[in-house]
Image (spheres, rainbow, N blue to C red):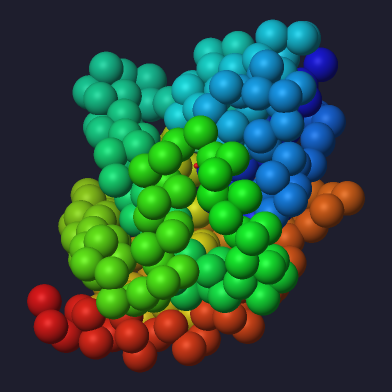
């Protein structure tokens, strides 16, 4: 049996749900309420000591880290393959699957926090409850970043750097897509699954002009991804706790600030 501890709007959870949907695998969802801090509950920490989602539990054995989980799924369940058949194709694919862990994931958390989550938390928690929440996070650097954004919003230098990293990553994707329809070449792969959440999130935050205005191949790629049946199953209606569109409401106002950062670069 496959159980997935996940969250409806978490990008890393989307990535794993996307791989499960492409593989056509059945799974049982265990929804973790991040806003309530369920990821730091003692029982969950036994599965994932990093206090993060997702965690896959396959026949009782936990597997953590979304990049590792997706490779695991592709290794454990052969068809349809989500890795290129040849060594060169796999190397190319893995360069892309490393991208989230090498910076874009933290950048995504910073941009999301500045554009939406900080205000959401500040409107739902008292200052004391927010302090308690920050104190319970095992990753102290993450807690520090969240505190800085709650205090200074888009003015924090690392938020500006995060926006520039997105710009650079989107440009690299635009160029790679000149060689074929998918990031690793001719076939859809874990590379495409790994990067999709990082367009989907910015799209939901109202920041799609980062690719719709100047990156036609990337815009087409994202449209092709969204046209696949797996997109809906992974991103929209996986139930019982489906996506919620709070981010769109909160994100519209972020574009002028993001545009200003890009214009200064
Ligand atoms: N490298 C990890 C990152 C996981 C991660 O950052 N998960 C976020 C949601 S996307 C989380 O659980 N956040 C909870 C928190 O910040 O307290 C992975 O790829 O699985």
Q: Where is 260 relative to 198, above or below?
A: below
Q: Where is 62 relative to 103, above or below?
A: above
Image quarter hosting the C terminus: bottom left
Residue at 48% over, 23% down: 68
117 relative to 150 in the view: left or right: right
Residue at 67% over, 37% down: 39
Residue at 24% over, 87% down: 260
Outermost left residue = 265
Outermost front residue = 128
Q: Where is 225 relative to 253, above or below?
A: above
Q: Position of residue 200 (x, y in %)?
A: 51, 62
Q: Nearer the viewer, residue 163 or 194?
A: 163
137 relative to 41 in the view: left or right: left
Question: Which quadrant would residue 24 be assigned to in this image?
Answer: top right
Q: Nearer the viewer, residue 174 or 252?
A: 252
Q: Position of residue 214 (x, y in %)?
A: 25, 79
Residue at 61% over, 23% down: 48
Q: Is residue 118 visible?
A: yes
Q: Position of residue 155 (x, y in %)?
A: 28, 77
Image quarter hosting the N terminus: top right
Q: Where is 38 relative to 179, above or below?
A: above
220 relative to 40 in the view: left or right: left
Q: Nearer the viewer, residue 204 or 33?
A: 33
Q: Is residue 220 visible?
A: no
Q: Nearer the viewer, residue 137 or 22?
A: 137
Q: Position of residue 33 (x, y in %)?
A: 75, 48
| Total numbered labels placed on residues in the image | 0
């Amino acid at each position: 049996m496959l159980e997935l501890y996940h969250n409806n709007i978490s990008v890393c959870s989307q990535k794993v749900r996307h791989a499960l949907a492409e593989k056509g695998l059945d799974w049982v969802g265990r929804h973790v309420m991040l806003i309530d801090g369920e990821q730091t509950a003692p029982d969950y920490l036994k599965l994932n000591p990093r206090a993060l989602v997702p965690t896959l539990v396959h026949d009782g054995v936990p597997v953590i880290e979304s990049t590792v989980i997706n490779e695991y799924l592709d290794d454990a369940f052969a068809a349809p393959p989500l890795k290129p058949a040849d060594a060169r194709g796999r190397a190319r694919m893995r360069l892309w699957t490393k991208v989230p862990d090498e910076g874009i994931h933290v950048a995504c958390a910073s941009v999301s926090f500045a554009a939406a989550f900080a205000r959401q938390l500040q409107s739902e928690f008292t200052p004391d409850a927010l302090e308690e929440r920050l104190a319970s996070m095992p990753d102290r650097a993450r807690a520090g970043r969240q505190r800085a954004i709650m205090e200074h919003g888009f003015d924090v230098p690392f938020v500006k750097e995060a926006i520039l990293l997105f710009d650079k990553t989107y440009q690299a994707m635009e160029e790679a897509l000149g060689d074929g329809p998918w990031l690793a070449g001719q076939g859809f792969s874990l590379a495409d699954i790994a990067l999709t959440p990082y367009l989907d999130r910015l799209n939901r935050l109202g920041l799609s002009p980062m690719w719709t205005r100047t990156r036609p191949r990337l815009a087409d790629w994202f449209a092709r991804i969204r046209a696949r049946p797996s997109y809906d199953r992974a991103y929209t209606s996986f139930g019982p706790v489906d996506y919620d569109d709070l981010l769109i409401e909160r994100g519209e106002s972020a574009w002028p600030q993001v545009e200003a950062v890009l214009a200064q670069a």
